[in-house]
Image (cartoon, grey):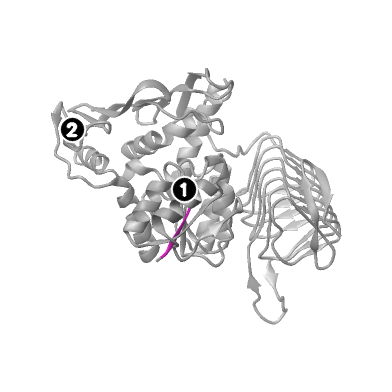
């Protein structure tokens, strides 16, 4: 078993150290030259060093990938790793939308791969003991849970404090209650960067009557990481800022907990799940549940809908009189589906999309938000289309290589990444990935992966140039 660690920053360094100690470090990837030199000096040359590009090619390196990059890059790296056949552990949050999280989860299931989310506290010995207090009835029925995760730490710009700090606490609270909240409200403030919340307070109400709140703050003068569970027969407190002999208390009395590094337990669990095929404690579906709570809290912060529901609403979309949406399909709010088009069972279409005339989608196809599919296109099972994609008229997606009428073909998945555009009458051979904001020229036949921001044209499609801020830069002669 060899693991490639993508990201050697503040937390990635810890992951690299543990993988090295467990003798599973297969390689390190980081775009920062200074960090690469530091890792090389510390660990020498693992078998699979990959340098340079923002998204590494995973096809020939390691059995599994751990992603510890900025959250905005998680989805892009993870989906390409899964399509390369690698097991994946992603640091929290697993993606920036629950729709992306579901795409990752579905892809991992389809390919029979392990997908795990780094909700570290679920592997903490004190939390595992706290779960025992609840399942064994020691503190009785849960009435209220609250958590404070406060720190004078690094202020980020690509995510607010809710998305940076709260996933751990949301994951723990969902695990302790065994249910998903029915209502979520949140409030907070932005002081350092306009629009990026530095402090939030999230309130959760559960169908059983349990209530909880999560207070996160990265401008606090000292560190505090406390989870309090009040039952009708006792109170348990997990204070992770304390030493191990005081991290957990029951009714004010310390509980002896044997030291185990949570990160080591987490990575060991990841390896075990790969080797045995068991589902991780924090699998993709658990990661999606956490994302849905984060999304609902975020909507409340901006005074939008506070009711927790599906990230893809199943009402308030338009269908022409001759269009058909099967009962087991889901279509997002604001999407329009025009004449003679059909959405087959198990398919999911995001918000604010446009599906033209005579389009067939599915079964079991996932399409993101703001996708425009023009007339006479069939999107077969195995094709995944991310947000903001344009599909021109009469584009052909195949889902089998070397088709034959008298025998079963080889089915392979196709991925069209965020912001890509495919021109009219193009043919996309199954098994390829069209990269982020890539452009496929009209009539082209794509037979291999198209990197992000590349333009390809012709039959077979070849490199024509790059697209940068919607400006086309042709390749040199």
Is residue 284 something one can see in this rendering? no
Closer to the eye: label 1 or 2 = 1
Q: Quadrant of residue 315?
A: top right
Q: Residue at x 51, y 57 (%)?
A: 108
Is residue 35 something one can see in this rendering? yes
Gap in Å between the C-alphas at discs 1 and 2?
31 Å
Left or right: 95, with 442 as reference point: left
Q: Residue at x 46, y 66 (%)?
A: 47
Q: Residue at x 34, y 39 (%)?
A: 178
Check disc 2 and report its element: helix, strand or loop: helix
In the image, 315 versus 21, the foreground residue is 21
Q: Which residue is mark 2?
A: 246
Left or right: 31, with 40 as reference point: right
**Within 10 Å of the Cα at label 1, are there few (<14), some (14-19), or many (20+) other Cα atoms?**
many
Check disc 1 and report its element: helix, strand or loop: loop
Indicate which disc residue 430 carries. none
Q: Quadrant of residue 251?
A: top left
Specify whether residue 327 is painted magenta. no
Give the extent of the magenta segment.
2-8
Q: Earlier in the sequence, mark 1 or mark 2?
A: 1
Instruction: Locate the N terminus by quadrant.
Output: bottom left
Q: Position of residue 261 (x, y in %)?
A: 27, 47
Left or right: 171, with 322 as reference point: left
Q: Residue at x 37, y 34 (%)?
A: 169
Left or right: 20, with 260 as reference point: right
User: Cβ–Cβ below 8 Å for labels 1 and 2?
Assistant: no
Specify whether residue 6 is painted magenta. yes
Indicate which disc residue 8 carries. 1
Q: Is residue 47 above or below residue 331?
A: below
Total labels: the figure holds 2
Instruction: Locate the C terminus by quadrant.
Output: bottom right
Q: Position of residue 222 (x, y in %)?
A: 33, 22
């Amino acid at each position: 078993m060899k693991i490639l660690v993508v990201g050697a920053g503040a937390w990635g360094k810890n992951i690299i150290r543990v993988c090295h100690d467990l003798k599973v470090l297969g390689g390190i990837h980081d775009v920062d030259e200074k960090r690469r030199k530091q890792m090389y000096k510390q660990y020498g040359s693992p078998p699979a060093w990959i340098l340079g590009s923002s998204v590494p090619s995973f096809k020939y390196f390691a059995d599994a990938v751990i992603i510890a990059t900025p959250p905005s890059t998680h989805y892009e790296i993870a989906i390409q790793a899964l399509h390369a056949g690698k097991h994946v552990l992603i640091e929290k949050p697993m993606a920036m939308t629950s729709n992306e999280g579901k795409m990752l989860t579905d892809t991992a299931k389809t390919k029979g791969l392990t997908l795990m989310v780094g909700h570290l506290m679920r592997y903490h010995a004190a939390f595992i003991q706290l779960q025992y207090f609840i399942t064994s009835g020691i503190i009785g029925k849960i009435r209220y849970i609250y958590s404070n995760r406060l720190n004078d730490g690094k202020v980020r710009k690509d995510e607010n404090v809710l998305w940076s700090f709260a996933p751990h606490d949301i994951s723990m609270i969902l695990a302790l209650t065994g249910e998903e909240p029915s209502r979520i409200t949140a409030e907070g403030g932005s002081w350092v960067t306009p629009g990026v919340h530095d402090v939030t307070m999230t309130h959760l109400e559960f169908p059983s009557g349990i209530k909880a709140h999560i207070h996160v703050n990265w401008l606090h003068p000292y560190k505090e990481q406390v989870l309090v569970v009040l039952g009708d027969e006792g109170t348990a407190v997990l204070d992770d800022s304390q030493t191990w002999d005081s991290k957990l208390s029951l009714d004010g009395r310390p509980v002896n907990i044997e030291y185990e590094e949570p990160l080591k337990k987490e990575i060991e669990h990841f390896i075990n799940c790969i080797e045995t095929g068991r589902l991780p404690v924090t699998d993709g579906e658990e990661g999606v549940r956490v994302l849905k709570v984060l999304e609902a809290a975020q909507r409340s912060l901006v005074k939008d809908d506070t009711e927790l529901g599906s990230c893809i609403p199943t009402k308030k979309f338009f269908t022409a009189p001759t269009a058909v949406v099967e009962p087991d399909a889901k279509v997002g709010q604001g999407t329009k589906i025009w004449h003679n088009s059909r959405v087959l069972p198990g398919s999911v279409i995001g918000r604010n999309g446009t599906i033209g005339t005579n389009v067939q989608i599915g079964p079991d196809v996932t399409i993101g938000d703001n996708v425009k599919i023009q007339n006479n296109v069939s999107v077969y099972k195995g094709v995944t289309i991310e947000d903001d994609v344009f599909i021109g008229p009469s584009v052909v997606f195949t889902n089998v290589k070397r088709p034959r009428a008298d025998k079963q073909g080889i089915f392979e998945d196709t991925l069209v990444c965020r912001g890509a555009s495919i021109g009219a009458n193009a043919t996309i051979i199954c098994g390829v990935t069209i990269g982020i904001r890539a452009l496929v020229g009209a009539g082209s036949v794509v037979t291999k992966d198209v990197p992000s921001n590349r333009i390809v044209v012709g039959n077979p499609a070849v490199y024509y140039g790059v697209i940068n801020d919607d400006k086309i830069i042709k390749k040199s002669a």
